[in-house]
Amino acid sequence: MEDTAVLNTNIIVDSPNVVYTDSEIISSYDYSDARVHGNILTPTTERLVFKTERHVPRVGALLVGWGGNNGTTLTAGILANKLGLSWETKEGTKTSNYFGSICKSITVRVGIDDNQKPVYVPLNNVIPLLDPNDLEIWGWDISGVNMGDAMRRAKVLDWNLQQQIYPMLKEMVPMPSIYLPEWIAANQEDRADNLIHGTKFEMMNKIRHDIRDFKNSKGLDKVIVVWTANTEKYCVVRHGLNDTAEHLLNSIREDSDEVSVSTLFAVASILEECTYINGSPQNTFVPGCIELAERFNVLIAGDDFKSGQTKLKSVLSDFIINSGLKLQSVVSYNHLGNNDGKNLSTPETFRSKELSKSGVIEDVVRANRLMYKYDESPDHCVVIKYVPFVGDSKRAMDEYVNEIFMGGKNTIALHNTCEDSMLAAPLILDLIMLAELCTRIQVKRDKDEKFTKMHPVMSILSFLLKSPLVPSGSPIIHCLFPQRYAIINFLKALIGLPPESFLMLEHRLE
Ligand code: NAI
Ligand code: DG6
């Protein structure tokens, strides 16, 4: 007999605190923590009421950089899943799947059965989520190559799968985009043949028009815009330029050189009241952009998809330090040969990625002042090299050196073949699915009269992002398992279930 059970259906919570109507799930939830004053701790409980729309609307995603490796891999992957395609490889027949997507491929413990065995359900059975096979997908690219040839150019998916998908993707051509060469590497110039022209204000309005057009022509209820285009250099943040929403909008009207392309897309999206996700490391979300999102109550998330090496780092640094070992040095080499690697081979674009890949151990170090002094942190070095031959199969080599008991040293060396875009595509899907869910949630504190939407900055999506954007003043969590349980426990709260505590007292008491 199995010692766990998996329920493959939607679940219903039978509780006085949970009400199901035709259109909503309303859950009254006690959020517990403890308040600390000096050395006195007072347990606290706050009653929250969550209201989640049950109906998943018709959703479309617009990808900026659609014709790139991530964009083509995601689009082909969804199509293959929708059509239930399988294909031959030298290792045998492969079938379409959504491995790598937490929304589609993980299960969550929801309770115990009468025999005290844990019962698991797929994450997308906890609460209604968008089915990726229903997602309408389109986008912009500065390269006018059709999506079939762009998929071939990416050299990511198996050839036999490409051959089946090619005729369908060939009919899809990215919309022209904004190209301002100074924001990305000069080596991208030869791709830029599918462009819109005009002042920044005019180009942003064209993007707004494209969003509206896509929404209307496909009969969609919601559109989510995702930046999966090249990494840009950082932009300056300056008083009068982009520090407030008003200043940023003025700077766009005045055609200021210092407004980046990605910020133009984010502003266009916010003004169209569409959720915007930044999958690259640059600081698209300047303070004025965040203020604009807050003003329009539009959800935003970023920065930089967390796929391979950094995901592992956010596990290993947690594992090492929270095992009581003193992580003293982390050195991360990457080499890759895709267009992303080519674009990152200039100092300015590399710097954006270096910053995003380097921040990941900060919170776990800061939380431990037993082993680390206040100004102390491990040596951390990130190297990225462009090696065309390895293509999208990025190689990531990491060395972790830990100081252990009584002056000993423990060295961990890793080699990780990342298959970059096949790791990133399902993350993009998760970001879209979870962001869409967030737009259906409203919350009310006991003392509040009205329900409000969630905070526009969706830090709940941190699991999927290397450098999570959080509401001002909120701590940034990088460690992977806390990030994942934040999502799982939040989804459980929406249906009135307690957070996963791992206590298992039913097995530990007499
Ligand atoms: P890619 O270089 O294959 O694709 C980027 C696409 O963006 C290209 O087709 C390019 O023509 C297009 N593009 C550039 N500027 C544009 C603009 N202004 N408007 C519209 N399109 C534009 O790169 P890939 O591998 O798809 O990655 C995309 C982004 O995601 C990069 O910034 C990368 O650093 C980031 N990323 C990728 C991960 C991965 O594992 N593949 C993981 C984490 C982040
Ligand atoms: C070099 O690391 C290229 C980058 O674009 C990464 O491949 C990408 O950001 C994924 O990084 P990671 O650290 O999550 O594997």
Image (cartoon, grey):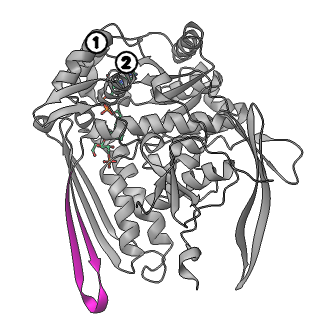
The magenta region covers 399-416
Q: Is residue 154 left or right of residue 130?
A: left
Residue 145 is marked as 1
Q: Amino acid at mark 1?
A: Val
Front-most of residues 405 and 46? 46
Q: Look at the magenta stretch and give its main secondary structure.
A: strand
What residue is drawn where x is 65% and y is 31%? 247
Image: 154 above or below 232: above
Viewport quadrant of the N terminus: bottom left
Front-most of residues 28 and 351? 28
Can residue 479 be seen at all in this image of the molecule? no
- Residue 386 is situated, as x and y percent measured from the top left of the image, at 18, 40
In the image, the residue with mark 2 has its CB under 8 Å from the nearest atom of ligand 1 = yes
Q: Given contact means CB atoms under 8 Å apart, are the residues at marks 2 and 1 in contact?
A: yes
Q: Residue furthest bottom?
A: 406
Front-most of residues 399 and 32? 32
Q: Residue furthest front?
A: 1
Can residue 15 be seen at all in this image of the molecule? yes
Mark 1 element type: loop
Residue 111 is marked as none
Q: Is residue 195 left or right of residue 209?
A: left
Q: Is residue 7 magenta?
A: no
Q: Is residue 415 magenta?
A: yes
The local crowd at label 2, few if under 14, some if 14 to 19, many if 20 or more residues have their Cα within 10 Å, is many
Q: Which residue is mark 2?
A: 141
Image: 154 above or below 297: above
The local crowd at label 1, few if under 14, some if 14 to 19, many if 20 or more residues have their Cα within 10 Å, is some
View quadrant of ligand 2: top left
Viewport quadrant of the C terminus: bottom right
What residue is drawn where x is 86% and y is 41%? 450
Q: Amino acid at mark 2?
A: Asp
